[in-house]
């Protein structure tokens, strides 16, 4: 029995060495566009984060009650994540049928237009409408991941995810600086923008215009340079013409009706619910959902915690300082993952990295009350800033869980033709988690009210962390084990 076990371990080591030696190079002619897409998508959220609490205060929806800011910030987040969750599976399945490129172009156009309208909004209702439209038409997140899996294989995907933090890092640096510095420019730079009545009327338009312009330029680049990564048996425009004229049987089409029907039936079979909802896919979806719930909740809590007054449980930082914190943390996270993720994956594997990231969640939560206690006792002293730095180091470790989930998702897909649909299921569950996560941030405001237990929110966050750890126990020690069994 023991010699057989040694033989199996030796075989596994040999297989790993062969995989390392036979790694497929990355297709840089298309991969660089995907990296820019990651930058554009991250830039939106990183730009909004520093000034959203101040924006809520400025429009007067809280009537001067600072403790209500967290509720409205959470509601604004929900206005994006709810419609996105409702349509994410539709966009993912559609990308399997018509291709990734049309869906991504639609998403980039939606980001460009809605970010502009967001900056022009002067009421909370206007902000909600902009975010709802952006969420409904932005199917980009899951489709980008599907495209990465289309153009890579099991040997090159970990290396690809080693590069993904670079655009996210740039967005994490540029976004907070843009959002923190260009919001209310007439007040911050009176010598430059002080005479502009337009920017005084719309004080957040300049900050929103940066990610809007980036998405508009990227749309043009993708239209001319991005290649379709899936084989579509019928051109998109011809399929739409056939669908619009499906009741008119006398009209002739450039593409035969039989070809269209067979194409649609073949693709529908590939992404049908009965074929996609396997135990493997459900396991990855559950793990991704609980991880996303915790990650998004922490990311929503951080700017709210920093902006909240010390007496109410925060650290009383203004948007520029919050922006600098996020920019520094984003730079450190991107550099670390770029230099070490692929190496750690080759040495430790996705499962070990994933569990280590989840293990860092508990001390991350415990540091919130510690940071507030230090701020109460010593103000923003060296000890307080050191605690903030340690917390962000732990968040860097936690961030490495995201690329691991992508590897498990690829391995769980029934076949390559259903990668988009599999990603759609995972993104659907993750989208539901994103809807719940802002409510967790609102729980911070609830626990800070007079007469409440200040630790109530942190108890809840610990429960989320243990939930994510529990669901991860069903994942295999190596994603390739699922692919080998298939």
Image (cartoon, rainbow, N blue to C red):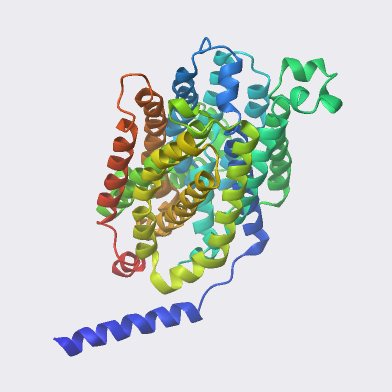
x, y percentage for residue 248?
52, 26
Q: Farthest residue in the top direction?
A: 63
Q: Is residue 481 above or below residue 451?
A: below
Q: Is residue 307 above or below residue 346?
A: above
Q: Residue at x 54, y 41 (%)?
A: 140
Number of labels in the image equals 0
Q: Is residue 448 above or below residue 373?
A: above
In the image: residue 190, left or right of residue 351: right
Residue 168 shows up from this direction: no
Q: Residue at x 36, y 82 (%)?
A: 13
33 vs 435, nearest the viewer: 435
68 vs 206, nearest the viewer: 68
Q: Farthest residue in the bottom direction?
A: 3
Q: Residue at x 38, y 80 (%)?
A: 15
x, y percentage for residue 315?
51, 33
Residue 39 shows up from this direction: yes
């Amino acid at each position: 029995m023991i010699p057989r076990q040694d033989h199996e371990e030796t075989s596994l080591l040999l297989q790993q060495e062969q995989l390392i030696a036979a790694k497929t190079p990355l297709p840089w002619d298309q991969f660089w566009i995907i990296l820019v897409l990651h930058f554009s998508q991250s830039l939106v959220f990183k730009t909004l984060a520093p000034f959203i609490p101040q924006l809520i205060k400025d429009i007067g929806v809280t009537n001067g009650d600072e403790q209500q800011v967290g509720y409205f910030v959470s509601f604004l987040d929900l206005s994006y994540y709810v419609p996105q969750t409702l349509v994410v599976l539709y966009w993912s399945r559609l990308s399997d049928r018509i291709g990734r490129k049309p869906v991504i172009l639609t998403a980039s156009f939606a980001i460009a237009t809605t970010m502009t309208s967001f900056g022009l909004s002067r009421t909370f209702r206007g902000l909600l409408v902009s975010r709802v439209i952006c969420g409904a038409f932005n199917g980009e997140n899951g489709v980008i991941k599907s495209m990465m899996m289309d153009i890579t294989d099991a040997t090159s995907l970990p290396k690809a995810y080693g590069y993904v933090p670079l655009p996210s890092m740039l967005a994490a640096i540029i976004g907070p600086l843009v959002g923190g510095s260009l919001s209310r420019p007439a007040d911050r730079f009176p010598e430059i923008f002080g005479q502009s009545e337009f920017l005084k009327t719309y004080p957040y338009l300049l900050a929103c215009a940066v990610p809007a312009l980036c998405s508009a330029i990227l749309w043009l680049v993708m239209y001319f340079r991005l290649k379709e990564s899936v084989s579509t048996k019928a051109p998109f425009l011809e399929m739409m013409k056939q669908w619009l004229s499906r009741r008119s049987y006398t009209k002739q089409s450039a593409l035969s009706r039989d070809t269209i029907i067979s194409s649609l039936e073949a693709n529908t079979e590939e992404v049908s619910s009965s074929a996609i909802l396997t135990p493997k896919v459900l396991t990855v979806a559950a793990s991704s959902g609980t991880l996303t719930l915790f990650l998004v909740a922490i990311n929503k809590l951080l700017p709210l915690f920093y902006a909240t007054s010390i007496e109410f449980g925060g650290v009383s930082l203004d948007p520029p300082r919050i922006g600098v914190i996020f920019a520094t943390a984003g730079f450190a996270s991107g550099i670390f993952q770029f230099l070490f993720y692929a190496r750690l994956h080759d040495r430790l594997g996705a499962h070990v990295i994933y569990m280590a990231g989840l293990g860092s969640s508990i001390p991350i939560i415990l540091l919130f009350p510690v940071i507030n206690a230090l701020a109460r006792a010593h103000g923003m002293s060296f000890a307080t800033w050191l605690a903030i730095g340690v917390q962000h180091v732990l968040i860097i470790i936690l961030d490495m869980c995201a690329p691991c989930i992508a590897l498990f998702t690829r391995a769980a897909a029934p076949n390559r033709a259903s990668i988009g649909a599999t990603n759609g299921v995972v993104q659907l569950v993750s989208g539901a988690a994103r809807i719940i996560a802002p409510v967790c941030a609102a729980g911070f405001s609830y626990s800070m009210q007079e007469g409440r237990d200040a630790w109530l929110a942190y108890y809840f966050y610990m429960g989320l962390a243990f939930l994510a750890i529990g669901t991860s126990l069903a994942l295999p020690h190596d994603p390739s084990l699922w692919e080998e069994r298939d």
